[in-house]
Amino acid sequence: MSNKNDIKSAIRSLARNDDEIYSILCTVSSVDLDNNTCDCVPINEAPDLLDVKLMPKDEDGEVKKGFLIVPVIGSVVVVTMLNNEDGHVTMFSEVEEIQLNGKNFKGIVKIEELVDKLNNLEDAFNNHISNYNNHITAYNTHTHAGVTVGGGMTGITTPDTPDTQNLTLTQVSDLENDTVLHGDGI
């Protein structure tokens, strides 16, 4: 057994690049969204950390769209150092913005407000249908005093049929993807 552990230890020793992974508690001093980086001031008064990655770049060094969390300037973050020069933010105390594959689709829907607006439209539509049907009923049953049915040119109207469609009110569960949640920080 001792030989296996010695071999493992020797392999680890040879593979080691003397870079130690560690984390530092910092405050955010600036954010650069063109490069998806931020500058951070360590709370332990160590030198400032510049160009800390908010998300990785691709193999060509290009900024891609993915999962980007933008911290609030002045907020506390944890920067994990991968080596002596490269770090990335791994924890955030306050978030300014979150982007999922960019921001061209704008913000995520506030589901309760959307359902309220849809329900208002559905109620208005259903009320219009009800009013329309009331008018159809009145039209179909109206009579003209002094007009007799028979031999002359009496204006007989063909009865119209009521509209039977109604909209069912939208429920949150009809629209909600409950695996992606968001809030306003409260």
Image (spheres, rainbow, N blue to C red):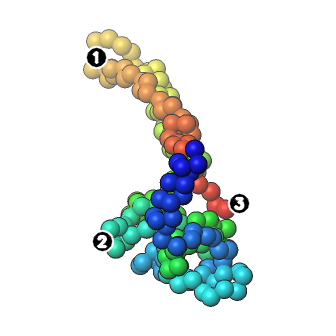
The residue that appears at 47% across and 29% down in the rendered structure is 166
Q: Residues within 10 Å of mark 2 (few under 14, many from 20)?
A: few
Q: Nearer the viewer, mark 1 or mark 3?
A: 3
Tag 1 secondary structure = loop
What is the CA distance from the residue labelled 2 to the residue labelled 3? 39 Å
Q: Residues within 10 Å of mark 3 (few under 14, many from 20)?
A: few
The answer to which of marks 2 and 1 sits earlier in the sequence is 2
Percent position of residue 30, x then y: 56, 83
Percent position of residue 128, x then y: 49, 37
The residue that appears at 33% across and 20% down in the rendered structure is 158
Residue with the mark numbered 3: 186
Q: Are marks 2 and 3 in contact (CB under 8 Å)?
A: no
Instruction: State whether residue 117 appears in this view.
Output: no
Quarter location, residue 163 = top left
The amino acid sitting under disc 3 is Ile
Give the residue at the far front of this rendering. 3
The amino acid sitting under disc 1 is Gly
The residue that appears at 72% across and 82% down in the rendered structure is 44
Quadrant into which the C terminus falls: bottom right
Residue with the mark numbered 2: 60
Percent position of residue 113, x then y: 58, 51
Q: Residues within 10 Å of mark 1 (few under 14, many from 20)?
A: few
Nearer-the-camera pick, 16 or 51: 16
Nearer-the-camera pick, 105 or 40: 40
Residue with the mark numbered 1: 152
What is the CA distance from the residue labelled 2 to the residue labelled 1? 91 Å
The answer to which of marks 2 and 3 sits earlier in the sequence is 2
Q: Is residue 186 above or below residue 167?
A: below
Q: Are marks 2 and 1 in contact (CB under 8 Å)?
A: no
Tag 3 secondary structure = loop
Whether residue 1 sits left or right of residue 45 in the image: it is: left
Q: Nearer the viewer, mark 2 or mark 1?
A: 2
